[in-house]
Amino acid sequence: MLKPIAAAIAAAVLATPLAGAQTLRIGLAEDPDVLDPTLARTFVGRIVFASLCDKLVDIDKDLKIVPQLATSWEWSKDQKSLTMKIRQGVTFHDGEKLDAAAVKFNIERHKTMQGSNRRGELAPVTGVDVVDPYTVRLNLAAPFAPLVAQLADRSGMMVSPKAAQAAGEKFSAHPVCAGPFKFVDRIAQGKISLERFSNYWNKGAIHFDKVTYEPVVDPTVRLANLKSGQLDFIERVNPSDMPALKGDAKLKAAKIVEIGYQGITINIGKSEESQKTALGKDPRVREAFELSLDRDAIVQVAMDGEAVAGNQWVAPTNAWYAKSEPIPKRDVNRAKALLREAGVTNPSFTLLTPTTADAQRVAQVVQSMAKDAGFDVKIQLTEFATTLNLADKGQYEAFVLAWSGRADPDGNVYSHLVSKQPLNYAGYANAEFDKTITESRETNDATQRAKLFEQAAKLEHRDRPIVYLYHRQWLWAHTSRLQGFRPIPDGMVRLQDLKLN
Amino acid sequence: MSFILRRLGAIVPTLFFVSVMIFGLQQLLPGDPAIAMAGEERDPNVVAYLRGKFHLDEPLPVRYGYWLKGVVQGDLGESVRIQRPVTELILEKLPITLELAGIAMAIALVIGIGAGIVSAVYKDTWIDYVANVFALWGLSTPNFWLGILLILLFAVKLGWLPASGYVSPFEDLGENLRSMILPAFVLGNALAAVLMRHTRSAMLQVLSSDYVRTARAKGLDERVVILRHALRNALIPVVTLTALQLGELLSGAVLTEQVFSIPGFGKLIVDAVFNRDYSVVQGVVLFTASAYIVLNLLADVAYVLINPRMRA
């Protein structure tokens, strides 16, 4: 009686499954959060959105804004309104039409929905006008240059107004957007399955019937899944696995420098604690600290060379990098002299370090380099959510902190360094800096903005609330059968033009 | 009957105490939960919204009251991170972990008891030594390390099994079992070692007892002596131990599920703690505690039914 069952099970177990040639299986480094562009707050969630929800605009590999759901856009003379032409013939996954009214609905949803994470990004937008069925105008209280770049991220993602109204707060259980793939189902903390949307406006560029996203947190296991053929594509490969990938004919690696940064944020004014260390009190001590570091060596030791050294909120490869403020060379003697000048010989401070592998390695290398100049760095390993709390309260001295980055440099600076902004953990408050960055938001002239960012970089280098260290490479790996992958600095995986042979 | 009623009556204060503990311990986690929940970008509006939604700006007893009110009505709240009811998540995850633990237990029983018998029967021979080395190895190998080694061998090198992940048995039973073999083996491995050691010593004791000598003296086949006469008695302590280890297995599943990316109960709670998804943490712990209380009650009732002396 049991024998046939046992035989059937054995047969099933031994049978090797044939992977559907039209399915693309992607391995993620983390589990995405809620799949509603208005409420979402994780980097990894944006990777799933890239195939689920198209945006008004997109960015290319040089961070230039390119059309997606909007075909063109134009600023008014006073720079207080942005008029966008909406692509015609686009439908949402539920068959609803995407038009100017739908865009208005979405911008308003982002701005007013309870718990919206987009409200801050769209704060300068005061209202949306439907000019004609395929033209919208976004009205602003004051000029705001980073707006178009914001629309290349979740703020520019469009959901079906009908589905959103019907589902209310439960929209994320079954998101309905206008991307190349539509939602099928999701196992919490497990696989997210999407299938091809047959009425996608750009369907010629899509070559898969299905795409699945599976969180595999351990990088070794993620790579093992790729090697064994369980996955076709993985993101965030371990830097130390890159050399082995080069020798494997079945696999291909891809990389590009991120738009974010990795650095050490120093508490210079967030709380009274900032005045307890020489590092927090005296810019000369911070300069000495920076001069004790060899960024190229940090990149080699902590990141296996898979990063580029940097000293600003954007990487030296970025068009917004201020070339007049290059990376300082390591100079231990000068560092010691600065410390003597400041009247401190053996400054000590505690370095708050999240328990991630990258952060720990960076902290250790920094500790040993700074020691040569006389710094006594104590590493305080703390779980990530707790580090953010400590930083927010100013209960720290220095903090190893990363930022995933935004396409417009404003997204890497404003919230982090302008006084009283939520992510300004350093407690930096410099009226001149605030004024410079605010001005950079008020002009759409790129040359003018670059000049302002250069000035701001100079001020930052004088005060050093953040010592920027390096910019990671986004590292991807995929089966060599997969063709057409385009690395973009935002770290997303765009499925347009990807093909499995 | 009155005993059972008394025990049932005791559940209410126990559960109340547990709920206070869960709620109180949660407050010991450092920092402001609203900030932790809001994540990397931390829009102040969102922090304020979360604070309101979870009543974080109100005093602790008031917050506890809100939570308790929901719990009594069968509402464990909703995950902030993925916006799904906690009850639904628990019901979705529990079968996955129970399946994993069940298969792990089966593997452990087969390997552990088998190896225990063999090494007792062949005491002080090379077979016994090999089995003992295996047991020592099983006990001292960390789950996550063994997991990664097995993935590299069976998934990457040999390509026989999937490296990680989970497939529902309703979707594809064969794939489901294939994806369960490695994690279940890793999870069952340490338990197998424990079972092997206990089976061996119990068997040795029984094998040297008078009735076994009698059985052999009557000329019974050695296989009958070992499997029918000796093993039955030797298994009694092993069975008790197995029941006790089931809880161990469930906590071991936390690590195993993490390595093999199995969206089960263990992964649910670990991820919830790291993301400060408080409703999920509270719900899962309350559920687990209730399950333990009910199981304990059932065990007590079973003792009473079996042993009349306890019915006083």
Image (cartoon, rainbow, N blue to C red):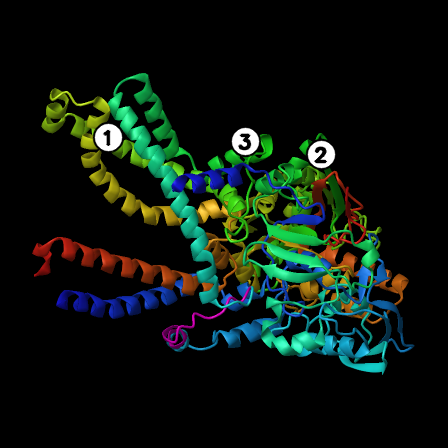
Relative side of A392 to A335, left or right? left
**Quarter of the figure with residue A367:** top right
Q: Position of residue A290 (x, y in %)?
A: 68, 47
When the figure is inspected, residue A391 is found, relative to residue B176, above or below; the finding is below
- What span is colored magenta in the figure? B68-81
Label 2 chain ID? A
Amino acid type assigned to the residue bearing label 1 in the image: Leu
Q: Identify the residue at image location x=26%, y=18%.
A: B124
- Furthest residue toward front: A1
Of the pair A495 and B23, the residue shown nearer to us: A495
Of the pair A164 and B236, the residue shown nearer to us: B236
Q: Identify the residue at image location x=52%, y=44%.
A: B174
Amino acid type assigned to the residue bearing label 2 in the image: Lys
Element under disc 1: helix
Q: Position of residue A370 (x, y in %)?
A: 62, 42
Task: Tell me the residue that label 3 is attached to.
Answer: B153
Task: Tell me the residue that label 2 is attached to.
Answer: A250
Q: Identify the residue at image location x=60%, y=60%.
A: A185
Q: Position of residue A194 (x, y in %)?
A: 67, 58
Q: Position of residue A377 (x, y in %)?
A: 55, 45
Q: Earlier in the sequence, mark 1 or mark 3?
A: 3
**Residue at mark 2 shares a chain with residue at mark 1:** no
Task: Tell me the residue that label 1 is attached to.
Answer: B227
